[in-house]
Amino acid sequence: MTNPLRVGLRQERVIAPQCLVIFGASGDLTHRKLVPALFELFLQRRLPSEFALLGCARRPWSDEEFRQKMAEAMTKTVNENRVAWDQFAAGMFYEPVDLQQPEDLVKLGHRLDSIDRLRATRSNRTFYLSVSPKFYGSGCRALADAGLLKDPQRSRVVIEKPFGRDYGSAQALNRIVQSCGQENQIFRIDHYLGKETVQNIMVLRFANTIFEPIWNRNYISSVQITAAETVGVEERAGYYETSGALRDMVQNHLTQMLAITAMETPGRFDPEAIRSEKAKVLQAARLADENEPWNCCIRGQYGPGGTQENPLAGYRQEPGVDPNSTTETYVAMKLFIDNWRWQGVPFYVRTGKRLPKRLSEVVLTFREAPVHLFDAAGGGPTANQLILRIQPDEGAEFRFEVKSPGSGMRSRPVEMEFSYDESFGEPSDEGYVRLLADAMLGDPTLFTRSDEVEAAWRLYTPLLELIEDSPWQLPIHPYESRTWGPAASDALMARDGLLWRRP
């Protein structure tokens, strides 16, 4: 029997003949995320037969070495789909390129022309900058100087996060990339926007009349946005020491989740209309205490923890980390959005490493009933909550009060739940699958526009300046690995009579 919810699942838009060029093809992101995502698109028959993948990096690999390296990184998947992999790998090529060497870009142009003829890709090219952020600007310039971005209909550039380090650097980088091509050629990627449940927030709100009328300050008392990780810094100490949780997670992933949750209804389902509403939200957002921002933000750093059988090192004991590091691995803060829909509603945002559970979620807590008519089984009645689970088990749940069994009229909270995997009979795609497809389609809906990026950086500028100029005002609070962060984070909520949701 066919699951009716699966009808029409794969009626996808058709990607034009295409050559995807990945700079940084020898890096971790390419073999761990990008090539697996492209192979998944191939297995779903969503890539055109006229498709080519060209890996570029400074290593002197051959085409066959590149194919072999990617196959080794995906051993299990390749072994399960050997025939399909061989077909996919036939369209994989490699060209040694240093983006700082103009002669290498000339050779790249010739190689692309050759691939166009071999694979019939019709000069449609998507350039993916999976390189160090310091090369984003110069990389775009190099592509423009080589004439590889001159056709806005056939060429585009995908830029990984972080896009800038602060408001000033984001503005400068925007000026550079916009001088190299048109805004519709620039795709600033945030893989959280590729997750089904992030996109589902828009559908939940704007396709269901039961939610939109109550999605405002009259009915919602607070919003919590959480992105928790169980892992530590792992092999990223070099990057993380200069970044920290505020730049690595809050400014992009969590802020995008906030923008989609709080945005106004767009006039139409159009990329620019949606991105304009997100930008307006971020332009209206502010720290809860702009004059004394240390009162609305908590920074933490994980220390040793775990068990005797499985001890976990603290952040300062991780390889490559300064033993006296003051880099935050945990951030919690309180924000407000000064517009008619959300005036006075606090938004609490938190993220951290080495927490007890991996999860990302948005929790909307509704105002309590004006009169409590019934006794509650566990004390006072529990506020209604809508919980949107972004990962790992994507879905949603609604918490509300019902009558407790028995002769009395006592209430107790229950949950109604929706799971993507269970409802649709298949797991949702990994974020990069959707985003790579959209980039090659030239659809910017799930990519951040220049004004969004700048508004997000501007929002956190007071905190970044404090960390730089007066770090003692935003001290690092230690917390034990595999706990829910420092006690100061709980105190931030307690001041408002609230608790973080503990799943």
Image (cartoon, rainbow, N blue to C red):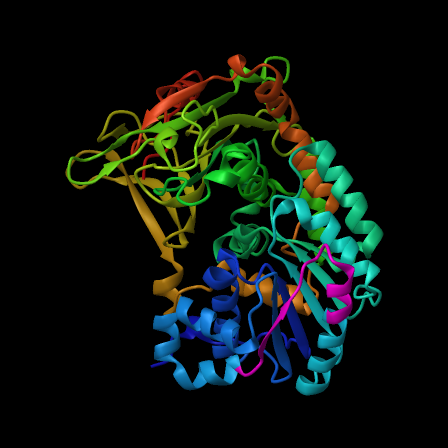
Q: Is residue 365 above or below residue 43?
A: above
Q: Quadrant of residue 353?
A: top left
Is residue 219 among what the camera can see?
A: no
Bounds of the magenta segment: 90-107
Q: Which of 274 and 358 is in front in this view?
A: 358
How far from the left and from the top, in percent, is residue 42?
A: 52, 77
Q: Nearer the viewer, residue 321 or 492?
A: 321
Q: Nearer the viewer, residue 226 or 87?
A: 87
How far from the left and from the top, in percent, is residue 325?
A: 45, 25
How far from the left and from the top, in percent, is residue 327?
A: 48, 28
Q: Which residue is drawn at 30% across and 32% down?
A: 481
Q: In which quarter of the image is residue 305?
A: top left
Left or right, 469 with reference to 415? right
Q: Residue at x 37, y 63 (%)?
A: 421
Q: In which quarter of the image is residue 345?
A: top right
Q: In this view, does 488 lie above or below 97?
A: above
How far from the left and from the top, in percent, is residue 477?
A: 40, 20
Q: Does the magenta segment cover residue 106? A: yes
